């Protein structure tokens, strides 16, 4: 028997992965959670029919969402991570001895538990003493928090289903308030290539741009995400993601990475013209 | 009825595209040639069950294989393009008024004819007066050519089937000889992500590295190629791809591009650590 997981990346495009077996399948209050074991990608986490991570390439997403802000401000001590129930972002953060506190807010306890039970490679740092897990709605959690965090990472799912509230002006406004005066916000920005993802990218970019004085978009190649071309938003009240990068300081930390490096840090903010045009056009017309 | 084109990117990964209709299908002496019309990507050219180009994203590949060398040496006048029967690389080259001669060598006349008849968006410049099309084996064509070209672009298919001879030491050695003292070679380098493509990348990199004093690899996001993460090799007897870039001079040409820009030119040579490691490791051990 052959078993394939097929994702409809758009109504006209399908991405299929051969599976050895299904390791976990459950319906939580929020979404369908599935874990497959595959020969090409190792274990794969799927939420509501969308690949969230694979063992083979999750390092790309998690390194790029974490080390970019950390290399810009190595004095970050207090971090809020929203979403990211799998623990991958937290794992990368715990590699910095200088970080004192990581609050992680995930709406779906069953995602955290499934990753703890089945995906140790990504959830391994959730038991770190500095990590505090809150099972709560990220939108509600940041409401009313003031001037507290050095860094907020929004590691959301797509803006449909449980991740929907995380793409609103109210949410980003609350994040702005929850950051201190040197605060950095990093947001997973979806992809510029397929229409539905491009819409989400514009939505996030516009809302963050309205709030933060510094707002830049960077990219990575993540093969198991639709189009493989993924974007992140870097926003800050104070720090410029390239001008304020201290390469030597980050390199002195000796953190071994598989995707991120300080040359790539500078390079990844150089976007294709068609992406620049979309971002710029949207700024002007909406 | 639903019609889907499915590509086996590896034996464990499939990429499927909904098709409206098949516009062309033929078996040449070298390969199977198919053209589909699709709602997501427009017209799609498939050779031996591998997507060569789509109307939606061919601009990425063709801009990146062409404008990188042209921006490094805007005095390029005499160009050899090997493979590239679709005409996309030639189309980008003809946008430079300064180019005097473009020799294009394609082994398969039926590819050229099919693209001329069905894919005008990509073959449109094949009738340019400066373009000379030779239906020949690229390996044979460059043999014995000496000190002639300013630029050779190897726009090959994968190193199986008709493209196989283009991944050999003999071929790259002949390219070296066919270039003049300021010559540049650009080679499509496959992808680092899936094993079989990674093998081809190493093969090309090692062979070119043995010949040219300057040899750098750069990347682009091409959604319809396996993994979406694609590499190119830039090699030269004289020019460094970043140090010798004259941004102002290229920008003064006023060539409108959708992917390439001079900021991205610098950024695209910053590779992920795992790709750097593969390239470096291979250099040392083979």
Image (tube, coloured by chain):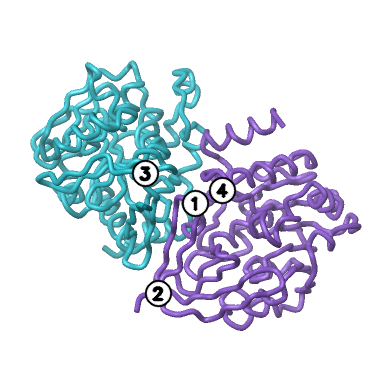
Chain colours: A cyan, B purple
Tell me which chain the residue with mark 2 is part of.
B
Which circle, 1 or 2, is nearer the viewer?
Answer: 1
The nearer-to-camera label among 2 and 3 is 3
Rendering coords of residue B260 (x, y %)? 55, 57
Question: Which x, y percent locates residue A127?
Answer: 23, 20
The vertical placement of A223 against A176, above or below, is below
Q: Gap between marks 3 and 1, in whole Å?
A: 13 Å
Residue farthest front in this picture: A1
Task: Please tell me the numbered disc located at residue B3.
Answer: 2
- Mark 1 / mark 4, whichever is N-terminal: 1
Percent position of residue A280, x then y: 37, 58
Q: Which residue is mark 4?
A: B191
Q: In the rendered image, is residue A283 in sight?
A: no
Estimate the spatial distance between the alpha carbons at disc 1 and disc 4, rounded to whole Å.
16 Å
Q: Nearer the viewer, residue A193 or A211?
A: A193
* Circles 4 and 2 on the same subunit: yes
Q: Nearer the viewer, mark 1 or mark 4?
A: 1
Q: Are the residues under badges 2 and 3 in a single subunit?
A: no
Tell me the chain of label 4.
Answer: B
Q: Which residue is mark 3?
A: A20
Quarter placement of the C terminus of chain B: top right
Residue at the spot of label 1: B11
Frontmost of labels 4 and 2 is 2
For the N terminus of chain B, which image quadrant? Answer: bottom left
């Amino acid at each position: 028997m052959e078993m394939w997981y097929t994702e409809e990346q758009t109504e006209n495009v399908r991405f299929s992965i051969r599976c050895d077996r299904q390791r976990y399948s459950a319906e939580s209050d929020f979404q369908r959670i599935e874990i497959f074991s595959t020969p090409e990608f190792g274990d794969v986490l799927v939420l509501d029919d969308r690949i969230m991570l694979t063992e083979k390439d999750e390092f790309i997403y998690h390194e790029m969402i974490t080390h970019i802000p950390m290399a810009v401000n190595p004095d970050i001590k207090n971090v809020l991570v929203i979403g990211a129930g799998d623990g991958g972002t937290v794992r990368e953060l715990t590699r910095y001895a200088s970080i004192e506190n990581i609050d992680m807010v995930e709406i779906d306890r069953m995602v955290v538990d499934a990753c703890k039970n089945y995906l140790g490679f990504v959830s391994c740092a959730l038991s770190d003493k500095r990590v505090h897990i809150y099972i709560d709605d990220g939108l509600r959690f940041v409401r009313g928090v003031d001037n507290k965090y050095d860094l907020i990472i929004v590691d959301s799912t797509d803006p449909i289903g449980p991740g929907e509230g995380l793409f609103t002006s109210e949410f980003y406004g609350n994040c702005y308030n929850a950051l201190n005066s040197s605060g950095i916000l990093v947001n997973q920005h979806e992809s510029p290539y397929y229409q539905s993802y491009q819409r989400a990218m514009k939505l996030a970019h516009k809302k963050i741009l309205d709030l933060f004085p510094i707002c830049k978009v960077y990219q990575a190649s993540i093969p198991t995400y639709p189009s493989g071309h993924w974007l992140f938003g870097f926003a800050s009240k104070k720090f410029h993601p390239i001008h304020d990068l201290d390469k030597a300081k980050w390199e002195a930390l000796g953190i071994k990475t598989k995707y991120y490096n300080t040359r790539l840090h500078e390079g990844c903010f150089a976007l294709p013209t068609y992406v620049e045009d979309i971002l710029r056009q949207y700024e002007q017309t909406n």
